[in-house]
Amino acid sequence: MEIGESFVGTGPNAASVSTVLGDRDGSVGAAWVAALATPTAGHAPFVAVLQRGLAVKPSTLVVNKARIDGTGHARMNWGPVQAGVAAGVADTVAGGMLTEAEAEQQVLIVAVFVDPAADDADALFANHREAVRSAIVIGRGQLPAARDAASKRNEAWNPFYRPTPPTP
């Protein structure tokens, strides 16, 4: 199992993705099927396609982290975000990061956060394409090393929160 994470872009059109890649016959495959078969209100996992009727390989399930908030938000998730995810996955196969044999045998789960305020379809597409490609590269490399992650424990922050520095 390979786990990756990537954040690309700024503002409401940024891409925040988490990936899990593994064998279709293993625990990742079982999780893939279970997630597809058990949607909940506002969260409907779906298969990423490059074009209508052309699913990307490895078979990729897109899972939304944020509850779908209206028609516009749904269109952003199922339109440019989904297309960007599919293109990013295909980029890893075309670029040799994943072999064709691996693409046939493995499945990928991509959890995406799409801000309900997202308003630029082209930015969403580009950011998700790069974030997915990057997350797969990170997962393939088993990055970061535990030592490197632990060394940053006192510098924790993310695009949604930055702690106020303590006063002397």
Image (tube, helix red, strand yellow):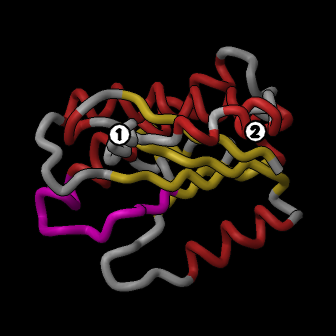
Q: Residue at x 74, y 22 (%)?
A: 97
x then y, percent, for residue 4: 66, 41
Up-down: is 118 above or below 11?
A: below
Left/right of residue 168 with respect to residue 4 in the rendered view: left
Q: Identify residue type, mark 2.
A: Ala
Left/right of residue 139 with respect to residue 46 in the rendered view: right
Question: What is the secondary structure assignment of the residue under circle 2?
Answer: helix
Q: Residue at x 75, y 30 (%)?
A: 148
x then y, percent, for residue 63: 48, 62
Crowding at dot 1, Cα within 10 Å, few <14 / some 14-19 / many 20+, comes out as few
Q: Residue at x 73, y 48 (%)?
A: 21
Residue tagged 2? 103
Does 65 appear in magenta? yes
Q: Viewer-proximal residue, 114 or 105? A: 114
Q: Viewer-proximal residue, 39 or 141? A: 141
Which residues fall within the magenta stretch?
Answer: 62-75
Question: What is the secondary structure assignment of the residue under circle 1?
Answer: loop
Q: Identify residue type, mark 1.
A: Thr
Up-down: is 81 above or below 24?
A: above
x then y, percent, for residue 18: 56, 48
Can residue 2 be spotted in the picture? yes
x then y, percent, for residue 22: 80, 51
Up-down: is 80 above or below 28?
A: above
Residue tagged 1? 167
Point out the tag, 2 or 1, that comes first from the N-terminus: 2
Left/right of residue 1 with respect to residue 150 in the rendered view: right
